[in-house]
Image (cartoon, helix red, strand yellow):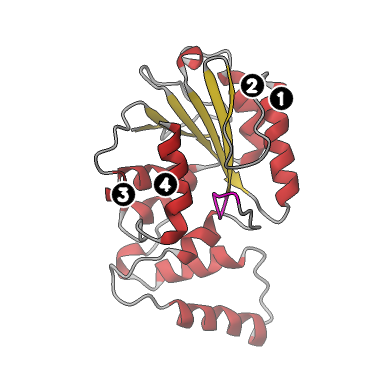
């Protein structure tokens, strides 16, 4: 399994030699999360050397990245292209956005998420965080992370963290536009080994339970990619 760690500006990095299966995701946190997931024991015995994870520095760069990649060295060697992005608060808008990207690039257009579309030598698909399944949910990577926190560093203190954020909202009149992000990072800050960690670094440090049922759809779909 290969991943990109540096993408200057908004331009994508290269498709590595030998890559057959490319996963495009929004940003560095997504890349770190997916890379750590692919390295976890749930994929033990699975050959992942031909899989590459590439982040595009934000969802607004997805279209530009795909349009560049279709003319890049190595793209014609791909067997599959999977886009993973957040559903955010507009599931239909996210679905339509990804479909329009595939259409503009002249690639097979999946009817919906969690379905492969095949044409000639390549198949394409997209998944929406947080469900990464055929049961769409509004939200983001943060919502998924909140559900799969590990007890590696002691009991998960989600109730206490939630109470703290709620008290800030009620007593201090704080507004959290991205509430799940606030919850996840407050949890990290309350755990010595995860202080100042982003999701990608936290994933590398064992913050998440990769065997969680919440991740079964994502695991199964990645397996169908290979």
- Residue 19 image point, x, y percent: 39, 22
Q: Are marks 3 and 2 in contact (CB under 8 Å)?
A: no
Point out the tag, 3 or 1, that comes first from the N-terminus.
3
Point out the tag, 4 or 1, that comes first from the N-terminus.
1
The mark found on residue 107 in the picture is 2
- Residue 195 image point, x, y percent: 37, 64
Q: Which residue, given by chain and number where applicable, does mark 1 sit on?
A: 103
Q: Which residue, given by chain and number where applicable, does mark 4 sit on?
A: 219
Residue 211 is left or right of residue 45, and the answer is: right
> What separation in Å lies between label 1 and label 2 (alpha carbons)?
6 Å
Residue closest to the eye, 160 or 193: 160
Specify start and end residues of the magenta stretch as a single range.
129-134
User: In the image, what residue occupies the spot 42% across and 22% down?
Assistant: 20
Q: Alpha-carbon neighbours of circle 1 within 10 Å: few (<14), some, or many (≥20)?
A: few
> What separation in Å lies between label 3 and label 2 (alpha carbons)?
31 Å
- Residue 2 image point, x, y percent: 35, 31
Q: Are marks 4 and 1 in contact (CB under 8 Å)?
A: no
- Residue 221 image point, x, y percent: 47, 41
User: In the image, what residue occupies the spot 64% across and 69% down?
Assistant: 176
Q: Is mark 4 on a helix, strand or loop?
A: helix
Q: Which residue, given by chain and number where applicable, does mark 3 sit on?
A: 42
Residue 40 is left or right of residue 185, and the answer is: left
């Amino acid at each position: 399994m290969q991943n990109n760690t540096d993408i200057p500006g908004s331009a994508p990095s290269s498709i590595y030699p030998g890559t057959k299966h490319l996963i495009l995701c929004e940003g560095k946190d997504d890349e770190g999360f997916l890379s750590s997931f692919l390295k976890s024991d749930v994929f033990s015995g699975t050959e992942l050397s031909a899989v590459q994870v590439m982040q595009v520095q934000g969802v607004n760069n997805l279209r530009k990245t795909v349009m560049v990649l279709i003319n890049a060295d190595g793209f014609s060697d791909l067997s599959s292209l999977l886009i993973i992005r957040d559903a955010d608060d507009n599931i239909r808008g996210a679905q339509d956005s990804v479909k329009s990207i595939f259409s503009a690039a002249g690639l097979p257009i999946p009817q919906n998420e969690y379905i492969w579309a095949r044409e000639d030598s390549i198949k394409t698909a997209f998944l929406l965080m947080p469900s990464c399944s055929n049961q769409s949910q509004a939200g983001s990577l943060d919502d998924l992370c909140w559900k799969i926190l590990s007890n590696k560093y002691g009991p998960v203190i989600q109730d206490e963290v939630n109470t703290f954020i709620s008290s800030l909202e009620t007593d201090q009149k704080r507004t959290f536009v991205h509430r799940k992000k606030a919850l996840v990072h407050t949890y990290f800050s309350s755990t010595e080994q995860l202080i100042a960690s982003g999701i990608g670094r936290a994933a590398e440090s064992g913050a998440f339970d990769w065997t969680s049922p919440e991740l079964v759809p994502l695991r199964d779909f990645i397996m169908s990619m290979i």
